[in-house]
Amino acid sequence: MQKVYVGMSGGVDSSVTAALLKEQGYDVTGVFMKNWAQDLPGFKCPWREDMADAKRVAVQLGIPFKMYDFQDQYKQKVVDYMIAEYEAGRTPNPDIMCNQEVKFKLFLETALEDGADMIATGHYSRIRHTRLDRESSKDIDPRIKSDDDSLELLQAVDGNKDQTYFLYRVTKEALSKTLFPLGEMTKPEVRIKAQELGLITAKKKDSVGICFVGEIGIKEFLQNFVTTKPGNIIEKSTGKTVGTHDGALYYTIGQRHGLNVGGGLPYYVIGKDMAKNEVYVSTDLNDPDLWHSSLVMTNVHWINSVPDGLDDLTVRVRHRGPLISVKELTLLEDGNYQLELKDEIRALAPGQSAVLYQNQVCLGGGIIV
């Protein structure tokens, strides 16, 4: 019987993940990752309540329960990275870094050293294993491994919940030791399953905010770790100062809310100068600074290999954003990749991720320059 350590966050998705794997005959252990426990002004970190909920579900399911303390590594690999990116004027995605460095590296390595054969999480995505030596690739049981197996990361059945965008930097080796039981289910089906099992998390609301930190906004979080000063908000077309901000790093391209610029048409952030501490805005939704038909991505990661053709090749530049067809993919001399797009993309934000797909397969991607 294979031993699977399930990352249990105290939410309904990871609760059902553990339940399904136990039903399928795995030897399941629940693990709560203590990644952040610091209370901030006006915000109480919910880690104690979340761990208690995860432990209660483990008791309900009759499975062992552990807690791994990853606070130091999480601060270094995720939080410090996020702060540095914002200070540089970019817009990072901490959930992607959390998956790369914590869940599918640190958690995986610790679990394997602790006796696990595999790990599992409540992500909505799928893993397909195929035999390369067959003329027609055929799905095989993910528990069966051989040297000629190829692995693909597939979008979830529930397109509204698909989380492959956040998983594109996970290595193929890590995915080969991972199970995603929820990939074939919809969120309503997960809720129904939890209620049928009587799990205490069945009606618990999904958390929002920074991964593993809780329901706190990025700005409120950053204010505890960065020093900023007020600056001007400038209308690009006229050069006129139309308002003030409390730190250029808090603003991202395409942002509309939170500008506190009153009257008339709504303003959109179209650029910023970190050296001058200035934010540039426009009321013109067709402003060329808001639209791009090409992009460059750095720090590129391919789950298997570089796509060998452009047929059905698409890119997504934000979670649940539209898939845009790619008409050209070029490796540049500096190792970055340039994408030429068939349609323009609105509000391209440096620091965010561009993730490539072919049909349902997530190929990999990189950080937008």
Image (spheres, helix red, strand yellow):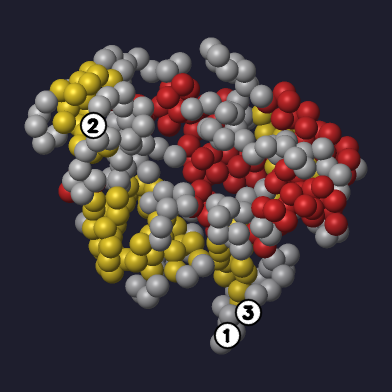
Q: Residue furthest front?
A: 264
Q: Which residue is mark 2?
A: 264
Q: Secondary structure at mark 3?
A: loop
Q: Establish if 1 lies above or below 198.
A: below
Asked whether disc 3 touches disc 1, contact meaning CB atoms under 8 Å apart, the reply is yes
Q: Which residue is mark 3?
A: 138
Q: How far across and down, in percent of the image, does residue 223 sit?
A: 42, 18
> Residues under labels 3 and 1: Cα distance?
6 Å
Q: What element does badge 2 sit on?
A: loop
x and y percentages locating residue 190 in the rendered image: 73, 52
Which residue, as the protein is rendered here, is positioned at the far left?
238
Q: Amino acid at mark 1?
A: Ser
Disc 2: CA contacts within 10 A as few (<14), some (14-19) or many (>=20)? few
Q: CA distance from mark 2 to mark 3?
A: 58 Å
Quadrant in which residue 212 is drawn: top right
Residue at the image point whose x is 9% and y is 32% from the top: 238
As drawn, is 78 to the left or to the right of 8?
A: left
Left or right of 349: which side holds 63? right
At horizontal 62% and vertical 69% (from top left) the residue drawn is: 129
Residue under label 1, please give it. 136
